[in-house]
Image (cartoon, helix red, strand yellow):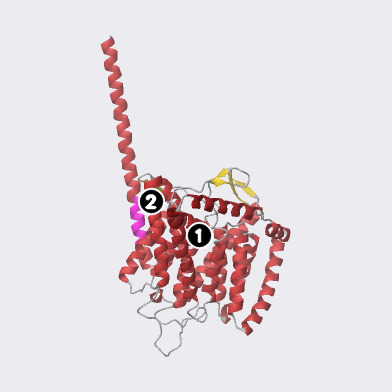
Amino acid sequence: MCRSMCVRSQRRRERTGDAHMSDQVVGLLWEGVQAAGALTLLVALMGAFVRWPMAAMVFLSLSVLVLWEWPAPPALVSVGGAAVYPNDVLVIAMVGAAGINLIRNTVRRGALFNVAALVTLLLLVSLLRGISDNGVGSAINEARSILFVPLVFLWALSVDWSQRGDKDRLLRVWSVATGIALTTLGFYHAIRYGVGAADEFVDVGGETHSGRILVSAQALVLAMCIFVVVATATQRHWARSALAVVPMAVVLVLSQQRSVLVAVAVALVVAFFRAGLVKKVQALFLGVAAGIVVLVIAVFVDGNVTSKLLQSASSAGTYEGRTAAWSSLIDASVEQGLPTILFGASMGSGWRRLDEDGVWVEYSPHNWYVSIYLRIGLVGLIALVVWCFAMFARALRRDANAAAIVVAVTLIVFGWGYSWPFQAMGVLGMLLAVTTGASDPTPGKPRESKIGSSSYRRQPIARS
């Protein structure tokens, strides 16, 4: 009898083992199917982005539009212990398209491209170090928000936009469509959830979301759309441009994103001082009139908006908490020695520090420049500063680059309060490439590339 029981027990174990092995095989097959699907999608997107670069811009718009509702979208597939998300597929496809562009096109890589590539290389080295030190998952999860920024920018510079038709129209259509979509989304949030202050939150299906009608990255992209629409408006289209810009500006004000509003103000000051005397006077009158209209409409939407804006502007608690975090993280970096000071800590090292209440926190420091220093050190921070100067140099090469200048300034100032969102780098890279146009004109002839006009020359070589 004992022998019979042992035999039955052994058979049960064998059946359990077979079932477990069968589950493993099914699981591996399912992962293989998912990986094949993701690879197919990646290849399809890559081909589409090479043939139709504006398709990538559309996907960037979709990526920024869902940030309020889905700040962390579900993973598509898991590969090697690392989850693959929709934005991963998007950016990898853009990188592949950029590689094909650089091989096929006659785009010459200038200083702006090279310095952005240098920052990318330093970040990739940090990522490889992080995979070795902290594991694949931790390193990649932290690298996404940083590495995607220069990668998308490099893609935009790799495209030969001189071969894509009317570049002004492409920029304008994208900006109008994306701006209207963000504006509609902002009004929807305002109507459904109310216009919350900076420190308010709303409950949506059991999840906590910001009480502000747009998150910071959405507000930043919206501001960029406004600048491009204004800069590309012609006299014939001024009325239609105003109808698009005014509601965009209302939503931008109602969003109460202080970092974005401050960045916009600084950019407008820069644009004002670059303008001629007549344009300065026109800008003053138009600016005051537009400001009054926007404020009146904002008050009509929410009668307490002025008090909320004043409260948000006078509240320094958040900023003080951030500066304390920056100081703590930088001090910890310095204590680790010269190699960390020069080259930063590896990706996945985390942002652990004590907040002002003495509680351990691990979220990102909300400062692009501090984040860059912490991951690629002083060497990387210097490269980033050179990158910013190269953007200015590129934008200042033509006479009428108001859109490029103000968008670049807005992004640079915004980086003091948040990290640069990769969704904003497509329009910036495209704008810089468009404003410089094709190759230099014939010696002795004036430069004809001009944002706001359709007088671009088709040239065989575009400079990045």
Tell me residue 221's x, y (percent).
54, 64
| Along the viewing direction, whichever of 114 and 26 lies nearer the viewer | 114
| Most distant residue in the bottom direction | 444
The residue located at (32%, 50%) in the rendering is 36
Camera-near label (2 vs 1) is: 2
Residue 364 visible in rendering:
no
The span from disc 2 to disc 1 (Cα, nearest Å) is: 23 Å
Q: Is residue 386 part of the magenta span, yes or no?
A: no
Q: Secondary structure at mark 1?
A: loop
Q: Magenta region's main secondary structure? A: helix
Tell me residue 92's x, y (percent).
38, 58
Q: Which amino acid type is shown beneath numbered disc 1?
A: Pro
The residue located at (65%, 54%) in the rendering is 198
Q: Secondary structure at mark 2?
A: helix
Specify start and end residues of the magenta stretch as a single range: 37-46
Question: Which mark, residue 314?
Answer: none
Q: Which residue is tagged 2? A: 129
Graded by Cα atoms within 10 Å as few (under 14), some (14 to 19) or many (20 or more), the crowding at tag 1 reads: many
Q: Quadrant of the N terminus?
A: top left
Labels 2 & 1 near each other (Cβ < 8 A):
no
The quarter holding residue 270 reads bottom right
Q: Which residue is tagged 1? A: 421
Residue 113 in the figure: left or right of residue 323:
left
* Residue 448 to residue 390: above or below: below
Graded by Cα atoms within 10 Å as few (under 14), some (14 to 19) or many (20 or more), the crowding at tag 2 reads: some
